[in-house]
């Protein structure tokens, strides 16, 4: 088998470079946003992986955007201006986050567990010792000025309340939806959300926010997603890995495959849509490595067999939200004939990023290293095209998931083919 090489590891298992200045919150007008803008510009200037800044004049961009920032009327407006500047680099893993965004907490939750210094520094921001925020566990996408739910974390308050991917969010308690602010101070309370599940048909759903621990929320959702789906007399194992940034996700998957709920499955559907990347390349080993099985027999005749590799069919689902090292896993599935990939083209977001805290505790995520697979293949800006393309847009889908259903069909076909050839 061809050797699978990676020049630098990605989100969650790679470089963590931190420049931390922790000061109290500062105003968002005049000199203050200009100060943060300067910190952002300088941090990118010092750390961006390409000294030529992907072909743009970085110094000229400073002049272009600095005057705009000083006129910003809010932190949100200033952040949008800063992100407008960063977008001109046309590079993934390069974005400015504020505490008004779930991604702010999620990025910190990914990097902090493996960085004791960062853990210590974050105690000034999170004195309770946990990186958490009040939320309901959804991903959203703005389409033509409307906010749609693009993903619902399994087992989350949103899932328990019956919110579905495809729902349009109209308001929360009569006010415009804000991903974090709408649920601040409302943990354990009934919160009314007005949604539109089908065009021009509004309804009200009551959801109960909870504190979401950014270091564990994606593992919790992964565990809640794990299930056996029975179709045509076949058992299809399914798991949604919302984040792969840490060994715990692969350990959980292997535990379910070899000892848990997925052990009796005839095939596996591995859902890598949305969320975050960070997958270790060793994640492919359970599908490609060869090794003996070990059968244990007790005196009463009971037996069980331990297998260290998955030798049954496996199908992967990806979409435009599959990013970073998840894309490398999709590449590996195709390159080494592990199994078919179903869905839509991936994000093309494959460089290595690192977080930097600014002096007002806002967060800058910067691409600090370029990434190639198998020596010379670059996925950044290109993405991975699935073997089976299933278009899917989240508007008013009422929870329907054609990509998942097609993956199940592909898995059943693979089982039947395997049986016919055995």
Image: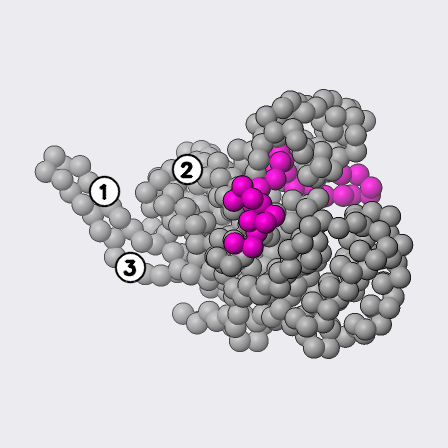
Q: Give neighbour class at mark 1: few <14, some 14-19, many 20+ (Cα, 10 Å).
A: few
- Give residue 304's mark: 1
Residue under the point 29% across and 51% down:
307
Residue 96 in picture, x, y percent from top left: 71, 56
Nearer the N terminus, badge 3 or badge 2?
2
Q: Secondary structure at mark 1?
A: strand
Mark 1 or 2: in front is 1
Q: Position of residue 120 (x, y in %)?
A: 52, 54
Quick check: is 62 in the magenta stretch? Answer: no
Is 414 above or below relative to 352? above
Residue 174 seen in the figure: yes
User: Circle 2 sits in a helix, a strand or a loop, which is it?
Assistant: strand
- Characterize the local packing of mark 2: few (<14), some (14-19) or many (20 or more) Cα atoms within 10 angstroms: many
Q: Nearer the viewer, residue 347 or 112?
A: 112
Q: Nearer the viewer, residue 3 or 214?
A: 214
Question: Could you say whether the residue bearing mark 3 is in a helix, strand or loop?
Answer: loop
Q: Which residues are magenta?
A: 120-147
**For mark 2, what is the residue?**
235
User: Quadrant where the N terminus lies?
Assistant: bottom left
In the displayed structure, 183 sits above or below 23; it is above
Residue beneath disc 3: 291
The Cα atoms of the two marked residues, 1 and 2, are separated by 19 Å
- Which residue is depicted at the point 70% across and 53% down? 360
Q: Nearer the viewer, residue 134 or 127?
A: 127
Q: Residue at x 73, y 22 (%)?
A: 203
């Amino acid at each position: 088998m061809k050797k699978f090489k990676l020049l630098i590891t990605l989100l969650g298992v790679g470089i963590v470079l931190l420049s931390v200045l922790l000061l109290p919150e500062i105003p968002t007008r005049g000199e203050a946003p200009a100060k943060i803008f300067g910190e952002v510009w300088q941090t990118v200037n010092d750390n961006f992986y390409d000294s030529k800044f992907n072909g743009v004049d970085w110094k000229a961009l400073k002049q272009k955007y600095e005057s705009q920032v000083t006129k910003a009327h809010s932190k949100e407006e200033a952040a949008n201006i800063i992100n407008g500047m960063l977008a001109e680099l046309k590079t993934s893993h390069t974005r400015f986050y504020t505490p008004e965004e779930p991604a702010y907490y999620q990025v910190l939750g990914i990097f902090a567990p493996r960085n004791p210094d960062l853990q210590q520094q974050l105690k000034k921001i999170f004195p309770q010792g946990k990186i958490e925020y009040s939320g309901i566990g959804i991903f959203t996408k703005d389409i033509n000025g409307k906010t749609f739910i693009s993903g619902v974390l399994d087992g989350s308050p949103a899932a328990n309340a019956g919110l579905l991917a495809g729902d349009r969010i109209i308001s929360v308690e009569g006010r415009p939806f804000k991903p974090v602010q709408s649920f601040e101070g409302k943990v354990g309370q009934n919160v009314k959300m007005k949604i539109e599940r089908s065009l021009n048909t509004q309804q009200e759903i009551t959801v109960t926010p909870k504190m979401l621990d950014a270091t564990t929320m994606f593992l919790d959702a992964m565990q809640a997603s794990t299930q056996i789906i029975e179709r045509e007399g076949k058992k299809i194992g399914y798991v949604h890995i919302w984040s792969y940034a840490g060994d715990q996700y692969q350990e959980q998957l292997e535990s379910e495959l070899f000892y848990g709920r997925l052990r009796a499955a005839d095939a596996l559907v591995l859902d890598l849509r949305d969320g975050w990347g960070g997958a270790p390349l060793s994640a492919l080993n359970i599908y490609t490595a060869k090794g003996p099985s070990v059968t244990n027999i007790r005196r009463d005749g009971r037996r069980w067999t331990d297998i260290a590799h998955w030798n049954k069919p496996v199908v992967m689902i990806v979409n435009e939200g599959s990013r970073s090292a998840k894309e490398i896993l999709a590449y590996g599935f195709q390159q080494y004939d592990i199994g078919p990939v179903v869905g839509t083209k991936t994000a093309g977001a494959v460089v290595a990023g690192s977080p930097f805290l600014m002096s007002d505790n806002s967060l800058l995520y910067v691409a600090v290293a370029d990434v190639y697979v198998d020596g010379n293949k670059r996925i950044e800006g290109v993405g991975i095209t699935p073997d089976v393309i299933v278009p899917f847009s989240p508007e008013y889908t009422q929870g329907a998931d054609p990509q998942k259903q097609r993956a199940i069909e592909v898995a059943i076909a693979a089982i039947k083919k395997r049986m016919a050839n055995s």
